[in-house]
Image: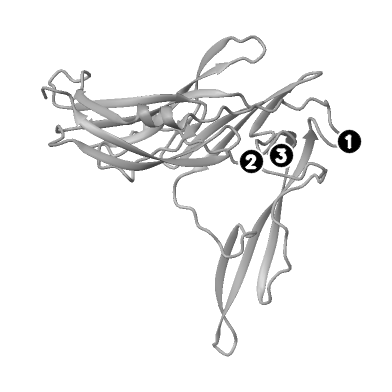
């Protein structure tokens, strides 16, 4: 039984470099500390070009945050009075090693033997400092334009409506299989919020995810478009794309059951749904769902 439907999942992660709005420093990266005693240290400097801009963070209509990313990750089109940026970043899903000293990229230990035969340990510290030559799009004295994308008010989540939608899930024969050996059912709710995938609180074959398909309404023209989140997966990496200015998107939050055997009896499960708005402001709610077989099965 598939515990997860990874090809359907969406991870609403947005990881950017946040800088103070008034900071015109052209470098970022770890601050190099004095070399520890009895150690060998070296720093590798990497020079990159970057874009930086401010946008409303969602904390309030007066609160602004800064997004900064290297030009090899973020492409921008800058007009006379607006701009568009597409930021592509890679999330590593394989093993990540955390070091005690956060500013170190690599630590190696060498064992040397002195003339008297005594062994000594010498640590070699290697870290990387990225120096950014930054193009400031809409802030600081070096800004190219004065345009700041407008604040988007996220509609309040209709909790009662969502709870009613997820009150009951009816499981029927899966019509995708001619032999009738699988059972499937789902309920969905269209929302401007992104819900986290949910699996751990459910038995095998049951889960919840936010669809990668979304509807976007152009605030200027009122026209609606359909988009698919451009996410790619590999064995160790997931690639995500974020488009700025941010837009309000509606996606389906889907609860499903995909089973090899029909339920022996009606089953009620209470689970937590965690969600966030387009600015990453998080919240959660408790949902109780009755899972039942279609009458006659």
Disc sitting over residue 16 in the figure? 2
The answer for how far apart the CA atoms under marks 3 and 1 are is: 17 Å
Packing grade of label 3 (10 A; few <14, some 14-19, many >=20) is: some
The answer for how far apart the CA atoms under marks 3 and 2 are is: 10 Å
Q: Position of residue 222 (x, y in %)?
A: 61, 10
Local SS, label 1:
loop
Residue furthest to the bottom in view is: 116
Name the residue carrying label 1: 141
Q: Residue at x 33, y 33 (%)?
A: 5
- Counting residues from the start of the chain, the first of labels 2 and 1 encountered is 2
Q: Residue at x 68, y 72 (%)?
A: 36
Quadrant of the snapshot with the C terminus: top left
Q: Position of residue 134 (x, y in %)?
A: 78, 38
Name the residue carrying label 3: 65
Number of on-image labels = 3
Marks 1 and 2: in contact by CB < 8 Å?
no
Is 103 placed left or right of 92 in the picture?
A: right
Q: Nearer the viewer, residue 97 or 281?
A: 281
In the image, residue 84 sits, relative to residue 163, either above or below, namely above
Q: Residue at x 17, y 33 (%)?
A: 260
Local SS, label 3:
strand
In the image, residue 36 sits, relative to residue 159, either above or below, namely below
Q: Position of residue 173 (x, y in %)?
A: 17, 22
Disc sitting over residue 260 in the figure? none
The answer for how far apart the CA atoms under marks 2 and 1 are is: 22 Å
- Counting residues from the start of the chain, the first of labels 3 and 1 encountered is 3
């Amino acid at each position: 039984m598939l515990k997860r439907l990874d090809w359907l999942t969406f991870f609403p992660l947005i990881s950017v470099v946040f800088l103070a709005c008034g900071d015109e420093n052209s470098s970022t990266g770890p601050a190099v500390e004095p070399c520890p005693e009895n150690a060998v240290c070296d720093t590798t400097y990497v020079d990159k070009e970057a874009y930086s801009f401010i946008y409303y963070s969602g904390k309030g209509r007066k609160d602004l945050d800064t997004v900064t990313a290297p030009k090899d990750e973020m492409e921008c089109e800058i007009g006379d009075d607006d701009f568009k940026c597409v930021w592509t970043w890679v999330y590593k899903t394989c093993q990540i090693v955390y070091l005690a000293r956060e500013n170190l990229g690599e630590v190696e230990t060498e064992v040397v033997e002195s003339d008297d035969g005594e062994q000594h340990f010498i640590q070699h510290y290697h870290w990387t400092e990225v120096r950014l030559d930054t193009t400031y799009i809409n802030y600081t004295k070096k800004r190219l334009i004065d345009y700041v994308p407008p604040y988007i008010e996220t509609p309040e989540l209709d909790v009662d409506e969502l709870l009613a939608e997820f009150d009951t899930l009816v499981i029927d024969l899966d019509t995708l299989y001619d032999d009738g050996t699988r059972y499937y059912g789902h309920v969905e709710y269209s929302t401007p919020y992104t819900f986290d995938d949910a699996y751990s609180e459910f038995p095998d074959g049951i889960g919840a995810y936010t669809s990668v398909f979304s509807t976007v309404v152009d605030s200027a023209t009122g026209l609606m478009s359909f988009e698919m989140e451009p996410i790619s997966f590999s064995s160790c990496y997931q690639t995500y794309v974020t488009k700025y200015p941010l837009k309000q998107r509606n996606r389906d939050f889907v609860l499903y059951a995909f089973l090899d055997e029909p339920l022996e009896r009606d089953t009620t499960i209470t689970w937590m749904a965690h969600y966030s708005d387009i600015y990453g402001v998080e919240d959660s709610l408790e949902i109780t769902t009755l899972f039942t077989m279609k009458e006659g099965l």
